[in-house]
Amino acid sequence: MKVVLQNLTKRFPNRNKKIREDVIAVNNFNFEIPDGKLIGLLGPSGCGKSTTLNLISGLEKPSEGKVFFGDDDVTDVTPENRGVGLVFQNYALYPHLTVKQNIMFPLENLKGKDKLSKEVMEQKALEAAKLVQIDQLMDRRPGELSGGQQQRVAIARALVKMPRVLLLDEPLSNLDARLRLQTREEIKRIQLETGITTVFVTHDQEEAMSISDLIVVMKDGIFQQMGKPQDVYDHPVNMFVAKFLGTPAINMFEACVKDGFLYFGEEKILPVPGIKDGEVYAGIRPEGFVLDENGPLSCDLKAVEVMGRDTSIVCRNPSCMTENIRVIVNSDRALNSLSGKVRFSVKPAKLHIFDKTTEVTLEREGV
Ligand code: ADP
Ligand code: MG
């Protein structure tokens, strides 16, 4: 089921009573979630992710704009009648009910012609439980399950009615690191198996990048960019997106363009055809540096950290806007002998240049 957000806006009265202006949690969103895809809705805490999800589910009414499921305008349809499955960070299971009863619960509420027999309900609950691999635990109560198992029950409960759209709000935040990895792969598998259009909210860029077909990056209620994770990483529209995606983060420099060349101070880094002369911000991804005795960028070496497959080089340069530059290179080099100064050249595709006022990406020729 395709989901379309049209001029969607949500304002709240400010929680801080001294501030008269409303908070615009979602500011004029216009985008389309394609049928059968998993979309990662990504941004820092407070940027309006949950509000967006609640507008899609119908738990919140928009201040302006519309929500469509396929061609149906669902803006005035209640959450129960939209056909959405919801999963939240805290699993919100009924503690006194068994796993089976928890999963069956949404079916028990069906009325009139939709009412199901007990047998059919049990069958559907079992199918949902199998999908999330908890069909062995049907008679336990939530208190007898681990966090990961409880979250699977919550997902099964959201799936039991075969929703048109599955909405997940930071569903992995309460799980420990290993379980988080495992459960996110499970969610990806379940989404592929069922083909249900899914919106997955997270503030964790790595989580969003790893499982999403498309990511939507937002900031302060404002849509920034939508695209395949790798495309957004490679072609961020602005400095916020560039900095938000990637660990270690992109390294930012105060820079200057003169006669088609990018300079860090006196260091002539690269030709940047198509960019006007003047001051700019330049960002280089950690994997964008090449150790090169004759390279233009000279840095003071601080540390070499071997991390298995990769090695992290921590170094400094006066033009860098943070104290340390983080460089990632393959480990199979004679890195231990490095000391004092190191020199790099820069991979053009891993360099991004931003307008100093608007922080919007400046397009170069040939990249
Ligand atoms: P996120 O999920 O990205 O952390 P939210 O959607 O929860 O962000 O919140 C976005 C903004 O809207 C925040 O500034 C938050 O304080 C505000 N907000 C959310 N819900 C309400 C509400 N019911 N009343 C007032 N302000 C709210
Ligand atoms: Mg939230």
Image (tube, rainbow, N blue to C red):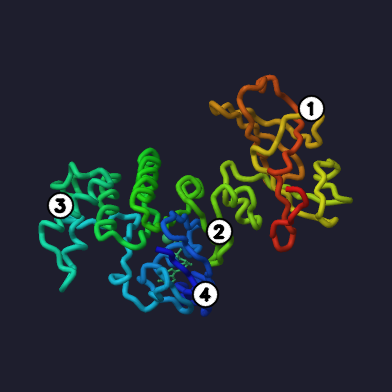
Measure how far apart labels 3 and 2 are at the Cα level: 40 Å
Dot 2: element: strand
Pointer 3: what residue? 98
Measure how far apart labels 3 and 1 are at the Cα level: 66 Å
Q: Which of marks 4 and 2 is nearer the N terminus?
A: 4
Pointer 1: what residue? 293
Q: Which amino acid does label 4 sit on?
A: Asn
Nearer to me, 269 or 209: 209
Nearer to me, 198 or 341: 198
Seen in the picture, residue 165 relative to 260 is either above or below; the reply is below
* CB under 8 Å between discs 4 and 2: no
Q: Dot 4: few (<14), some (14–19), or many (≥20) neighbours within 10 Å? A: some
Pointer 4: what residue? 7
**In this rendering, would 272 be left or right of 173?**
right
Measure how far apart labels 4 and 2 are at the Cα level: 16 Å
Q: Which of label 1 and label 2 is nearer to you?
A: 2
At x 40%, y 68%, the residue is: 56
Pointer 2: what residue? 226
Q: Which amino acid does label 1 sit on?
A: Glu
Q: Which of marks 3 and 1 is nearer the N terminus?
A: 3
Q: Which of marks 3 and 2 is nearer the N terminus?
A: 3
Measure how far apart labels 4 and 1 are at the Cα level: 53 Å
Dot 1: element: loop
